Image: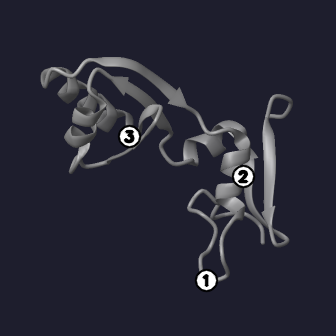
Amino acid sequence: EQICDNVTIMRTGAVVYHGSIAELRRRAPDPAHRLQTSDDTGAFALAAGRDGLAVTRDDAGLAVRGSQGALDAYVGALVRSGIAPRALSLDEAPLESLFFLLTESTPDSPPSALSDSGAAR
């Protein structure tokens, strides 16, 4: 990832992606953001039912996945409800994670939508 600009990813002998790493990242699912607040329990409850947002909770706080607009609206709702965001960081998926999204599938389940629809087979 640090020494190349373009990649070709294959699955069972077929090209599932060929192009730039930047384009591969653009096609990837929304990255997760790590969020810690003054009230993680309340923040988790506030996330329920929000369109375009998926929030999970673990010992390190909350993992928030969604579009930038959905994340912005959620953080705004936290502040309006009196819950203070204390830390928000982007957990960018490394190239290896994107590789596995493209290559791990079952015969009944085609590779992820990340694959290049115009790729040579």
Q: Tell whether 109 sits left or right of 29.
A: right
Query: Foreground: 98 or 26?
Result: 98
Q: Which residue is mark 3?
A: 67
Q: Are marks 1 and 2 in contact (CB under 8 Å)?
A: no
Q: Residue 57 in the image: state x and y as whole percent.
A: 39, 42
* Residue at the left extreme, as displayed: 81
Question: 42 above or below 120?
Answer: above
Q: Quadrant of residue 45?
A: top left
Q: Residue 2 in the image: state x and y as whole percent.
A: 81, 28
Q: Quadrant of residue 38?
A: top left
Q: Which corner quadrant holds the C terminus?
A: bottom right
* Residue at the bottom extreme, as displayed: 108
Task: Identify the mark nearer the N-term, 1 or 3.
Answer: 3
Q: Which residue is mark 2?
A: 99
Label 2 is placed on what type of residue? Phe
Label placed on residue 108: 1
Q: Secondary structure at mark 2?
A: helix
Task: Identify the mark nearer the N-term, 1 or 2.
Answer: 2
Task: Identify the mark nearer the N-term, 2 or 3.
Answer: 3
Q: Secondary structure at mark 3?
A: loop
> Which residue shows up at 61% across the image and 41% down it?
25
Colour scheme of the picture: one colour
Q: Tell whether 110 sits left or right of 96.
A: left
Label 3 is placed on what type of residue? Ser
Q: Are marks 2 and 3 in contact (CB under 8 Å)?
A: no
> Which residue shows up at 63% across the image and 64% down it?
117
Question: 88 above or below 31?
Answer: above
